[in-house]
Image (cartoon, grey):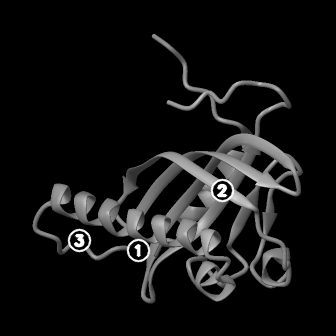
Amino acid sequence: MAATRFSSGRLVALFVALGCAPAPANNDPSPSVSSTSDTVEARRVFEENIDAIHKRDRARYLATYLHTSALGRNGPAGLELGYEGWSARRDSTWPDTLVARNLRVLPIAKGVVYGTYCYTVTQKDTTSNGVSERIFVKTPEGWKIAVTTAFGLPAGAPAQCK
């Protein structure tokens, strides 16, 4: 049996997202209907998020995220929390190109969906590949990204997306 390995940062991110999700009322007729609806809605927000990057639309991009201290952002520099101090709120740089492929979503619990995609990004004549993840939570304001990650591959490493 193969063991599944999670980095401590990814586990923290998952727990942060689960903690952000409101306690659901158990009034849905079918869990499978809820899972399908959740993944459809989370994917819509996922695609909105990526499209906002393509169009360099900061307001639309930021609207897809939780605007709370529970927003988790993780990458090679480690986990950071909070919306207020997030550099993306002020940063004026956008990638020259972003190719997002193999976008996948997976329901985790009612009102919580995990998403991932592989990316190739070019900015200022530098191209890199990596994996980005999102955890989506259903809020009273609609679906929002509670956790976002991006992990680049080492320079020269081939993209390994499944």
Q: Residue 98, labelled with which disc? A: 2
Task: Give the crowd class for mark 1: few <14, some 14-19, many >=20 residues within 10 Å.
Answer: few
Q: CA distance from mark 3 to mark 2?
A: 39 Å
Q: Position of residue 81 (x, y in %)?
A: 78, 69
SS at mark 3? Answer: loop
Residue toward you, 134 or 46: 46
Q: Earlier in the sequence, mark 2 or mark 1?
A: 1
Q: Position of residue 125 (x, y in %)?
A: 87, 51
SS at mark 1? Answer: loop
Q: Residue at x 19, y 58 (%)?
A: 31
Q: CA distance from mark 3 to mark 1?
A: 9 Å
Residue under label 1, please give it: 23
The answer to whether the residue labelled 3 contacts the one labelled 1, judged by CB atoms less than 8 Å apart, is no
Q: Position of residue 157 (x, y in %)?
A: 77, 25
Q: Earlier in the sequence, mark 3 or mark 2?
A: 3
Q: In terms of image quadrants, where is residue 42?
A: bottom left
Task: Give the crowd class for mark 2: few <14, some 14-19, many >=20 residues within 10 Å.
Answer: some
Q: Residue at x 16, y 61 (%)?
A: 33
Q: Residue at x 37, y 53 (%)?
A: 107
Mark 2: amino acid:
Leu
Q: Is residue 149 left or right of residue 146?
A: right
Residue under label 3, please give it: 26
Mark 1: amino acid:
Ala
